[in-house]
Image (spheres, rainbow, N blue to C red):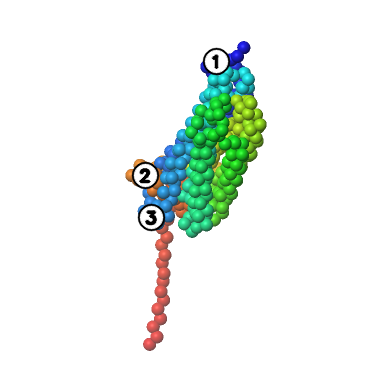
Amino acid sequence: MVNTSTSPPTLANPHGAPLVSAPSVVLVFMTFAVAARLWGRYRYRTLSSSRDTRYGESRFWILLSDITIVLSFIMNVALTAVCFVAVKWGEGIHTKELSLYQVHKVLEMFYVYQVLYKFVSGIAKIATLFLLLAIATPQMRAFHTFCKFFILYIAAYCLACSLATVFQCSTDFESNWNKALSQKKCFTLPPFWYTHAAINISATMVMIFLPWWLFSTIQYKRKYAIAIIMSSLAVAETALGVVRLYGLYKSAHSKGDMTYGTVTGILVSQLEIDFACIAACVPTVLKMLEEALAFFIVRVLGRTYNGTSGMKSSHNDNTTGGSAHIMSNLRSKDREPRIQGPYTSFDKDDQGGSMDSQEHIIGKVDPPTSSIKVQTDYYVTINE
């Protein structure tokens, strides 16, 4: 009996289930990371009387980074929704078990996903590059030049590949998912898939080393932790990109069963762009996690906290005043309402010297004051 259903299938779909569960879990972490980054932009805003142009330039880059990370997050959520709709219509079920209408709906979602993915795959990378430019000092001219050209390169190939996907069958858009229509205007897809995948993987590999280039020449709190996490996420993106390339190869050789063979490629593509979005939020999130840890140690455990060293001791053990941060009053003067916006300067308190972020969060113990009286006697001999 021929299946002519025009409703979503009711068949069991264990092969397509991960396409719903895995992106949903990662979406929770991504939402937390982006929300924490945007909230942290206001929480850690500082007043700056400096007229150094570096702060003006830093504000510009971090503003662009915030805009692009919000855009990336919105598109990631949209792509997750596309995955859900595709699975609803039978993504993960063999084509022979679906009606022609259901197959067309799945392939339509696959087409929409490809268009959006090729654009958003570079947006999060650009957000990270804007963030690195905001942290870099003006003296790092080579780093600034490389990042700016790299941003243009990523933006160019993402926009070009996305537009090419939109018009891969010229303006006969229905031919993209209804293979019964003429395919004469459509170009061959597998070589295009492989080319984009190779370009995207190579760009992700560059992102592995950029944090180390930046932090090897500047003083910055938590710089090694930030570099390790950002590089680890970039390594994970690279690995997922390789798996995606294999998934595209399987899809290219299973054109008769596209509803089943494209699951792997879509799943790793979604995880890849989600990890890229999270990576762009690492510096601010780490700063907030450190403050949360300090709050827990002091308020819950009743101990002192030595900043990023993580050393702890009881209040009674700190008799000398030392260098330990006593967090008896977390609401320091830096937490008062600010009349200026979040882009006064970017993480000025994180860039070494006396601008230690912990000085704004927790007050240090003032050394005991004492008065010292100095008396000097002069003996004068007069020779007549």
The local crowd at label 2, few if under 14, some if 14 to 19, many if 20 or more residues have their Cα within 10 Å, is few
Which residue corresponds to the image point at 58% horizontal and 29% vertical from the top-left? 22
Residue 293 image point, x, y percent: 52, 39
Residues at marks 3 and 2, CA–CA distance in whole angstroms: 15 Å
Q: Which mark is residue 50?
A: 3
Which sits in the foreground, 320 or 65? 65
Q: Are marks 1 and 2 in contact (CB under 8 Å)?
A: no
Sequence order check, earlier mark of 3 and 2: 3
Q: Dot 2 corresponds to which residue?
A: 341
Question: Secondary structure under badge 2?
Answer: loop
Q: Which residue type does callout 1 highlight? A: Ser
The local crowd at label 1, few if under 14, some if 14 to 19, many if 20 or more residues have their Cα within 10 Å, is few
Image quadrant of residue 228? top right
Residues at marks 1 and 2, CA–CA distance in whole angstroms: 56 Å
Q: Which mark is residue 5?
A: 1
Sequence order check, earlier mark of 1 and 3: 1
